[in-house]
Image: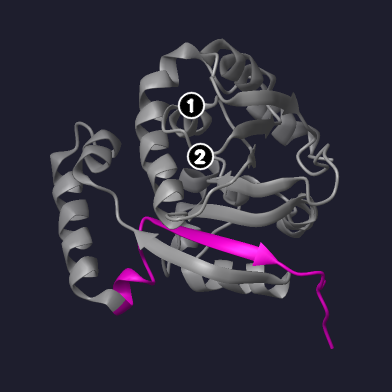
């Protein structure tokens, strides 16, 4: 079970005041999902940690997946998902953060976008995702820096309790017997940067300069993008050490 203090923190997180911001970010996340799945079709699709449903709404509008499902720990998120009346959404359920209430291999695809950085016990959730799905898509923000510990309050204020690089996230997946089928590092476009650094022109210009440099040097771009997206499949193996 998820810790009670974290459960309380998320239970009332979503309200109408954040709709525009969340929808803007969701369009990019949903587009990343569509891009990495190009040429593939899925019948049953589950989003784990569906938030207030913006990604599901985009995917439904773009006719991605025949039957969409969502699970979420936040009651306010569930309420907002239902208000959206998402055409392809078959059901959305409240869950405890770890136990997914569906049978083995029920879904063709599970989507877990910007969730793992919030999860106390990542491996427990990964094992449940693997249990219920044939393929998986994960997207995580790349918050890592060499002095990330100096920014702990900043990241905790966003609920980010896990910090990744693309390589560290791949290590986590591979050690839990997920096979990497396709992956991509993303850098935010201008619209996202302008929203993030609204009112701080200096920070915006620095972010654009940083993006320019990282895109010019692919090796660095794979270490420090804004986000990392990966399509996986899973076998029956489990974690083995020694």
Color scheme of the displayed model: one colour
Give the quarter of the image for residue 174: bottom right
The disc at residue 5 is none
Instruction: Note whether 169 is above or below 9 in the view shown.
Output: below
Q: Does the magenta portion include 224?
A: yes
Instruction: Note whether 135 is above or below 26 in the view shown.
Output: below
If the image is split into quadrants, where does the C terminus sit?
Answer: bottom right
Question: Residue 93 location, x and y as percent?
Answer: 74, 26
Range covered by the magenta-colored residues:
219-242
Query: Position of 222 compared to 96: left or right?
Result: left
x 43%, y 27%: residue: 61
**SS category of the residue bearing label 2:** loop
Question: Residue 215 location, x and y as percent?
Answer: 22, 67
* Alpha carbon separation for disc pair 2 and 1: 23 Å
If the image is split into quadrants, where does the N terminus sit?
Answer: top right
Q: Residues within 10 Å of mark 2 (few under 14, many from 20)?
A: few
Give the quarter of the image for residue 7: top right
Q: Which residue is mark 1?
A: 57
Report how many numbered discs are placed on residues in the image.
Answer: 2
Tag in front: 2 or 1: 1
Q: Earlier in the sequence, mark 2 or mark 1?
A: 1
Closer to us: 3 or 22: 22
x 78%, y 32%: residue: 95
**SS category of the residue bearing label 1:** helix
Q: Which residue is mark 2?
A: 158
């Amino acid at each position: 079970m998820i810790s009670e203090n974290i459960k309380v923190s998320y239970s009332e997180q979503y309200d109408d005041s954040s709709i525009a911001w969340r929808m803007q970010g969701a369009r990019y996340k949903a587009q990343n999902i569509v891009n990495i799945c190009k040429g593939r079709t899925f019948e049953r699709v589950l989003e784990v940690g569906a938030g207030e449903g913006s990604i599901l709404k985009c995917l439904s509008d773009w006719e991605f997946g025949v039957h969409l499902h969502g699970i979420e720990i936040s009651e306010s998120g569930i309420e907002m998902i239902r208000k959206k009346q998402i055409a392809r959404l078959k059901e959305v359920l409240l869950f405890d953060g770890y136990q997914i209430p569906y049978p083995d291999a029920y879904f063709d695809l599970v989507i877990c976008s910007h969730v793992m950085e919030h999860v106390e016990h990542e491996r427990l959730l990964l094992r449940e995702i693997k249990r219920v799905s044939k393929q998986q898509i994960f997207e995580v923000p790349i918050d890592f820096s060499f002095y990330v510990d100096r920014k702990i309050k900043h990241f905790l204020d966003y609920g980010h309790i896990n910090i990744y690089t693309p390589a560290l996230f791949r290590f986590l997946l591979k050690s839990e017997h997920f096979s990497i089928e396709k992956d991509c590092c993303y850098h935010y476009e201008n619209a996202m940067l302008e929203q993030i650094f609204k009112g701080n022109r200096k920070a915006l210009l620095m972010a654009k300069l940083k993006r320019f440099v990282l895109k010019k040097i692919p090796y660095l771009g794979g270490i420090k993008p804004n986000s990392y997206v990966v399509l996986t499949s899973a076998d029956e193996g489990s974690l083995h050490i020694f």
